[in-house]
Amino acid sequence: MEWMYVGIVAFLFLLAAFDLWVGVSNDAVNFMNSAIGSKVAKFRTIVTVAAIGVFFGATLSDGMMDIARHGIFRPEEFVFGEVMIIFLAVMVTDVVLLDIFNTLGMPTSTTVSMVFELLGASFAFSMIKIASDSGTTDFGDYLNTDKALEVIMAIFVSVAIAFVVGSLIQYLARLVFTFNFKSKLKWKIGIFGGLGITAILYFMILKGLKHMAGIPQEALDFVNQHEGWVLLGSFVFFTLLMQLLYVLKVNVFRVIVLAGTFALATAFAGNDLVNFIGVPLAGWSSFLDFSASGATDPMAFTMDSLNESAQTPFYFLFAAGAIMVCALVLSKKAHNVTKTEVSLAHQGDGEELFGSSRVARSLVRWGNNVGQFLSNVTPEPVARFIDKRFAPPAEANENGASFDQVRASVNLIVSAMLIALGTSLKLPLSTTYVTFMVAMGTSLADRAWSRESAVFRITGVLTVIGGWFITAGVAFTACFFVALAMYYGGAVAILIIVAIGVYGLIHSQKRFRKKMQTEEGDLLFTQMMECKEQKDIVPMLTRHLDVHMGECLGRYAATLRDTTDALFEESLHRLRKNDIALHKNKRELKNLRRREVVALRRADASEVVRLITTFHLVHNSLQQMLYGLLRISEPAREHVDNHFTPIPEAKVERYVPLRNRLALLMEEGSRNLEAMRVTDNAAVIDQLKELHEEFSAFRKEIIIEIQTSDENLTAMTLLLHIVQETEQLLVETRLLLRSCCKFHELA
């Protein structure tokens, strides 16, 4: 049986490499978003600074992996065979779970996932042991639930405190600097920079370096004993230094943001390394102890040795640091996760990644009422002063940044201060929760959440917070059942579950690549938002319109075929699937229109006046086509769901050829638009006109048959409805193609 445990250890290290990759991809959001969102430097520079910080933190970590060894369960109550299954179940679940969150672009906590996975697997074995002991023991004999309770409390504490404090400090910072901060720095920047660098340095020492190898204990003891004087001295020194840098024309905000990025990256790698390699190393240590003992029965050797703290060899730390750096530099999923937070925090118009929700609408309504009350009781001179300080700049943020360097600096300073304070007070504040909620609080204080975007932003924040709680529940439940399956299923079950995990990862990668290909097809929008020449906007918008109108037209043709075929075949599953897809398309179309309107606002006013009517005609036609498909899908689904009489076969045979001809013409129009052969659609428009006459004739036949024949009235009425909507779909297709041609002429 020893070969099986050798294989488990080897697989644990393989999963550790994957876990490092997906974990860094997820947690890159914690230390890179402020720099990315403010564009204080090139993306390559930001990644380089973060990568150095990550490698520095990983290689200097002392490797204290106690949470995996004895932080959740009591190892003296478990045997070698049990802890190895626990560790394997945790790693398989963790890698798959984090990869799912990365693919969805949702930041989550690696600490929460690992803690609750360990708790779930340990809980499963505790149940088995309690059952075998005939109730003489309880869960307290096997589990250390205090740690899990700490994590749960940390969620509430981190979310509330970070959001409120971030909002207040950003509000004060904006009052001091305004949005036109470059002309109002003078002496202020020195004090702000000194405070910021001191906070970041204190955070690094307290949170990032105190548990790292290579740092003399005497130095740490000195800092702890003279903490107040060290902070005061640092503040004075860095204040003078930042003021000097300002005099020398150095961008102090850029220094603060890059220093904060390095500090957070260092602390993340040094403190969270346990979340990625703690379990595999605990498994490795367990295997070495079992082998050294000379024991032959893995189900009889107790794991008392895991109660001892383990020192991680340097080569493990070095390898972990190298993998983390590679993940940070190469992982597109890391970029996907950062996109979520930047989108929720960006200033002004732009793409909204989330839709609306009832809770968000209620919160916005309540917030507007509170805001109106405060506005009524605020003296008018004070209100004018505040509005003046918060007046947005005449020009957009530099280089198309989502927010300015003032907010980026506040994000990093407040995050560092809160995490350092929480650490000193023994409060387990999560880096993920703090950095994200601070960013949301500062964006709210900066009035980035306008009435047009507030509902979408709050929905996004609630979605992310919900994801954190879901992480705990899913991690516990999934690992619980995985551990039970491995225990009762033995080697066969272990192989099957491992195979399923590997397949899940491969499948996830394929889905993500497909998703990224779709998103990368909209690079034109990014280019339009970053374009500084007004004359270049309209040609880019024209191309953007053609591509997306073509994509939608082709998609609608396929939907028409599939929906009507599902009706004729009485496939309720396909009808429900198409209905869900259409509602998703509705949200996407709304967002597409919003983005193109935002881009159009950047064009020359005279060009906009000339194009705006035709632009809206294009979108109106596309919207009516979507509504037409919904009006086909919903009654078709209801008809099949109620088991009503199918549409007569003869009528189906009469309708399908007409529908197929329409779908083919829609697809031809789609190809012409995507290939920028707009003039070729003149022939398509003529063919659609001819086909329209055939649809009209068929519609009249059905009306006559309803009045004169004894065919089932419900079925015939549905057929008439579908023919009418298909005919209207044809009309809107003609209008769309004609409007696209007109837009090209005007552009």
Image (cartoon, helix red, strand yellow):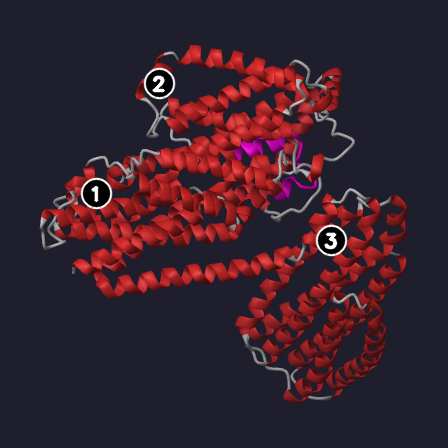
Residue type of the residue flagged with mark 2: Ala
Return the x and y of residue 582 as percentages of the image width and height. 63, 63
* Label 2 SS: helix
Q: Is residue 650 visible?
A: yes
The mark lying in front, picked from 3 and 2, is: 2
The mark lying in front, picked from 2 and 1, is: 2
Observer-nearest of 580 and 52: 52
Return the x and y of residue 393 as percentages of the image width and height. 75, 29
Q: In this image, 309 relative to 314: left or right?
A: left
Q: Which mark is residue 219?
A: 2
Label located before the other in sequence (2 or 1):
1
Magenta stretch bounds:
436-456
| Spatial CA span between label 2 and label 1 | 42 Å
The part of the image, by quadrant, that contains residue 502 is bottom left
Q: Which mark is residue 593?
A: 3
The residue located at (85%, 73%) in the rendering is 682
- Label 3, residues with CA under 10 Å away: few <14, some 14-19, many ≥20: some
Vertical order, 497 against 540 (above or below)? below
Circles 1 and 3, Cβ within 8 Å, touching? The answer is no
Q: Which residue is mark 1?
A: 139
| Spatial CA span between label 1 and label 3 | 56 Å
- Label 1, residues with CA under 10 Å away: few <14, some 14-19, many ≥20: some
Q: In this image, 64 relative to 594: left or right?
A: left
